[in-house]
């Protein structure tokens, strides 16, 4: 037991802080991973418990324990909501550093590079966290630095950058969920893609009776960071007869990954495309919502749906 | 440890609904209490028939089964003290029906309290038995603990809202208890017995709950007191006067200091403060209640008394209470805020004395304790702030807790107001209920002859809670 403890040179300093977590679980409702899998071991509190167990030696530094510590999108909503001011992501990062030393690297949510990488280095320049680099053979990711923002995935022309464990926030997942909603709800009009910060909690973990949801006009899908929006994703709902698509991102200076700025550019480009094919560009809208401003977010959604009602379906 | 037939469990709940990796088991060995113990498997049933099949298997093999909701219990109720299978009920999370005509809703047990209230809100109604932990606590967990909260002084606890339920027994049989009606006098009303049973009698798989209209008017106020005794006496007088507050909360000086120290809310550092609220459909009626409460506070030397209908002003008044948990956690870097002796209830007239006693006992044992709570319903909470690394602090905490509960019982109070007994409060519970323990054991045996449901809790819990399980802190020897 003692031996393992010594190996956690970075995590060690958090011993007292880990005791300060009162295990209230108030972080659950903010975590997109917990909401996706429903397992407490994926929730922030679960990771804090795992970190504690690693330090005391009660949890073996195994691949599955490491996978938990490497699974985080660094949205930091748990931290903002924490009852006890526990700096969760700093603790995760320190645990990661120690685990890497032990040869355990996740993958968790760390981005990886497939063999068919074109070595164009676009991702290296785009990564806001200096996590991607050329290691002499190919493009590698520093698992202690990667914050799983997914920007490398969206800039990679070869589709070689990947986050395998995307907890439902991957492009294919989102497209599938959007299409299911649009096809199973007669009243469906819009898909709202929201970053985890602009997203208001809604029902966090429960399901409403069908009678309550069948009239729904829109579905909100969390895509983690605005930086992960790209044309393919934003256009996909239109193939399933959506009347419009909205994307909610953080205000200009408030995204840790500068994903909002990328999103703005992409939506601008789509506006031009829409104009050129004679579709009202207002059918794609980007809104910037300060963290947790539920009222504004709801108001923006309502206005958007009103607008779509006036525009009607696309012919 | 028994060997678990993983294949059989997998067949019942499906590959994606079972975890047996030690790192997952470790996480599920904790809740919000000080305890930790390792389960053998975690399964997340999605249907009643899956719960039934799991119970049949566990009953055949005599394997402990512990239902788990949000894992926010504060006394180790969901900690698998004898190992076994954790039934993570969060997989049964459907709100099944909101029936406005008959004024009830039906929900699966894994529905989160806040979610239920969000769903009800659009109809102008709410589920009032809500605990402070409503963002994580599930209806199943609330039923098992008879949870209550700030508004229970007016609207009652979970037991008052539960009209009926479906329960899976340890042998896998499904029974329907209670009804969909407001009143029932048909025999033993076993649904009310299940409320507060801490998962030891059956697994709740569906609950029928009543709700109430959201009031048009809410007015909140605060009164400061230079002596804790005055505040305590004011509580007694308010409740005895026939006033009907919808909230009556006490915070003591330790709590106020903690909030000021960490949050800079500029609260006046008095010995105690009372936060009160009244609500209703008619403003004059609310005014009447508020005036009555204000006058009583004045009579008991309350100062700076004010109240407001304005939502912003109300939020400001409640901020100190709301920020109490974080404040206590950040009170001192070397002290952790632990849930020990965390709740109790005493008759109104003893409220002041209890709060004073808590402080006296804390000083005597060289630990920091705070007294606060939903005093309008007779409920007092404490937190023990201590250096969890030091073994002597645990000894002091243990001594202090015994003293607090000795006092509580001596004035005809009860060991738990709303957080339940679990492991940590079993010592006092057993003394309090000593003459009915054999009845309790008989009831347990009637429901669960093989003792597989959450064994080792309530009357079965070990005498010494400090050594009953591993503690979730690193304690130096
Ligand atoms: C910060 C904080 C504040 C709190 N404030 C309050 C408060 O104001 N009022 C209050 O009353 N409590 C409060 N609590 C305590 C706790 O939240 C409640 O006891 C709550 O009811 C527990 O619900 P849970 O879903 O988390 O249950 P868990 O902790 O998961 O389980 C508790 C017990 O319920 C049993 N159980 C769970 N589901 C079922 C089921 N379907 N069938 C049978 N048994 C089941 C378990 O076996 C266990 O014995 C607070 C806790 C925290 C951490
Ligand atoms: S919100 Fe903070 S204190 Fe509460 S469980 Fe999560 S990390 Fe711990
Ligand atoms: S761009 Fe984002 S996901 Fe990609 S390596 Fe950098 S931090 Fe990780």
Image (cartoon, coloured by chain):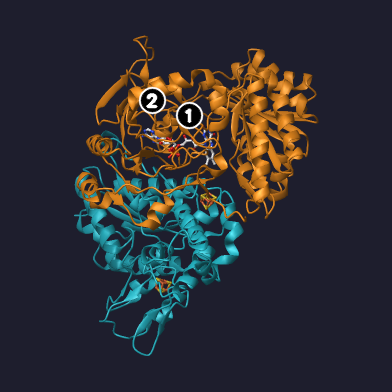
Chain colours: A cyan, B orange
Q: Can residue B223 be seen?
A: no
Question: Which chain letter matches label 1?
Answer: B
Which class describes the residues within 10 Å of circle 2: few (<14), some (14-19), or many (20+)?
some
User: How far across and down, in percent of the image, does residue A312 sit?
Assistant: 25, 48
Q: Is residue B192 above or below residue A4?
A: above
Q: Nearer the viewer, residue A202 or B34?
A: B34
Earlier residue among tags 1 and 2: 2
| Disc 2 within 8 angstroms of ligand 1 (CB) | no
Across the whole image, how many numbered discs are drawn on residues? Answer: 2
The quadrant holding residue A270 is: bottom left
Asked if residue B88 lies left or right of residue B469, the reply is: left
The label number, if any, that marks residue B459 in the structure image? 1
User: How far across and down, in percent of the image, does residue A41 sit?
Assistant: 40, 54
Q: Residue at x 77, y 34 (%)?
A: B271
The answer to whether the residue labelled 1 contacts the one labelled 2, judged by CB atoms less than 8 Å apart, is yes
Instruction: Residue under label 2, please give it.
Output: B444
The quadrant holding residue B414 is: top right
User: How far across and down, in percent of the image, does residue A129 sit?
Assistant: 48, 74
For label 1, the SS is: helix
Distance from Cα at disc 1 to Cα at disc 2? 10 Å
The label number, if any, that marks residue A208 in the structure image? none
Q: Can residue A76 be seen?
A: yes
Q: In this view, does A258 lie above or below B216?
A: below
Question: Which chain letter matches label 2?
Answer: B
Q: Which residue is drawn at 25% across and 81% down?
A: A116
For label 2, the SS is: helix
| Disc 1 within 8 angstroms of ligand 1 (CB) | no
Quadrant that contains the C terminus of chain A: bottom left
């Amino acid at each position: 037991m003692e031996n393992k403890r010594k190996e956690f040179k970075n995590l060690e300093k958090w011993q007292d802080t880990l005791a300060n977590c009162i295990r209230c679980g108030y972080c659950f409702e903010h975590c997109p991973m917990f909401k996706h899998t429903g397992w407490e071991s994926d929730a922030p509190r679960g990771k804090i418990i795992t970190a504690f167990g690693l330090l005391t030696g009660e949890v073996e530094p195994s691949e599955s324990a490491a996978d938990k510590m490497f699974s985080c999108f660094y949205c930091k909503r748990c931290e903002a909501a924490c009852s006890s001011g526990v700096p969760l992501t700093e603790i995760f990062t320190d645990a990661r550093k120690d685990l890497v030393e032990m040869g355990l690297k996740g993958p968790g949510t760390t981005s990886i590079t497939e063999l068919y990488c074109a070595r164009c280095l676009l991702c290296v320049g785009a990564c806001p966290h200096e996590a991607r680099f050329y290691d002499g053979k190919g493009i590698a990711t520093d698992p202690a630095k990667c914050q799983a923002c997914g920007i490398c995935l969206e800039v990679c022309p070869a589709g070689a950058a990947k986050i395998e464990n995307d907890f439902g926030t991957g492009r294919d997942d989102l497209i599938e969920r959007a299409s299911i909603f649009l096809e199973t709800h007669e009243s469906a009009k819009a898909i709202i893609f929201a970053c985890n910060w602009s997203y208001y909690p809604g029902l966090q973990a429960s399901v409403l009776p069908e009678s309550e949801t069948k009239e729904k006009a829109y579905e909100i899908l969390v895509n983690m960071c605005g930086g992960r929006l790209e044309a393919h994703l934003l256009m996909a709902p239109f193939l399933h007869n959506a009347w419009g698509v909205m994307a909610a991102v953080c205000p200009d200076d408030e995204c840790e990954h500068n994903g909002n700025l990328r999103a703005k550019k992409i939506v601008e480009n789509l506006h031009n495309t829409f104009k050129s094919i004679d579709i009202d560009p207002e059918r794609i809208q980007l809104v910037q919502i300060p963290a947790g401003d539920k009222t504004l977010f709801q108001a923006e959604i309502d206005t958007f749906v009103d607008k779509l009602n006036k525009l009607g379906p696309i012919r | 440890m028994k060997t678990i037939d993983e294949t059989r469990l997998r067949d019942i709940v499906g590959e994606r609904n079972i975890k047996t990796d030690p790192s997952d088991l470790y996480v599920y060995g904790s809740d919000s209490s000080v305890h930790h113990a390792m389960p053998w498997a975690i399964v997340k049933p999605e249907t009643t028939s899956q719960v039934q099949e799991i119970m049949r298997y566990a009953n055949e093999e005599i394997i402990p089964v512990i239902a788990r909701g949000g894992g926010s219990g504060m006394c180790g109720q969901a900690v698998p003290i004898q190992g076994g299978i954790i039934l993570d009920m969060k997989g049964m999370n459907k709100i099944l029906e909101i029936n406005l005509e008959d004024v009830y809703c039906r929900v699966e047990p894994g529905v989160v309290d806040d979610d239920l209230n969000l769903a009800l809100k659009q109809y102008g109604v709410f589920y009032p038995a809500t605990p402070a932990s409503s963002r994580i606590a599930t209806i199943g967990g609330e039923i098992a603990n008879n949870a209550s909260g700030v508004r229970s002084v007016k609207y009652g606890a979970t037991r008052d809202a539960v009209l009926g339920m479906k329960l899976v027994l340890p042998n896998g049989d499904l029974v329907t208890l209670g009804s969909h009606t407001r009143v029932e006098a048909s025999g033993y009303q076993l649904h009310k017995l299940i409320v507060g049973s801490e998962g030891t009698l059956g697994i709740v798989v569906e609950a029928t709950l009543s709700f109430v209209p959201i009031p048009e008017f809410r007015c909140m106020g605060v009164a400061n007191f230079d002596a804790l005794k005055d505040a305590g006496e004011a509580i007694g007088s308010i409740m005895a006067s026939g006033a009907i507050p919808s909230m009556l909360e006490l915070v003591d000086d330790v709590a106020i200091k903690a909030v000021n120290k960490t949050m800079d809310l500029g609260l006046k550092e008095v010995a105690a403060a009372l936060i009160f609220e009244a609500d209703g459909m008619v403003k004059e009626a609310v005014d009447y209640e508020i005036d009555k409460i204000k006058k009583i506070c004045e009579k008991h030397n309350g100062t700076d008394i004010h109240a407001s209908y304005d939502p912003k002003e109300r939020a400001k008044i409640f901020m100190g209470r709301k920020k109490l948990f974080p404040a206590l956690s950040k009170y001192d870097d070397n002290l952790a805020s632990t849930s020990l002796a965390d709740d109790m209830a005493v008759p109104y007239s003893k409220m002041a004395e209890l709060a004073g006693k808590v402080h006296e006992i804390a000083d005597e044992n060289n630990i920091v304790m705070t007294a606060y709570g939903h005093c309008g319903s007779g409920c007092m909470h404490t937190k023990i702030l201590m250096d969890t690394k030091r073994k002597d602090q645990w000894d002091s905490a243990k001594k202090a807790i015994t003293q607090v509960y000795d006092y509580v019982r001596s004035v005809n109070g009860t060991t738990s107001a709303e957080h339940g007994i679990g492991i940590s409060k079993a010592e006092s519970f057993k003394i309090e209920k000593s003459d009915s323990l054999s009845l309790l054991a008989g009831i347990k045996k009637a429901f669960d002859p093989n003792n597989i449901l959450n064994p080792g809790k309530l009357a079965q819990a070990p005498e010494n809670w400090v050594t009953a399980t591993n503690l979730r802190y690193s304690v130096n020897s």
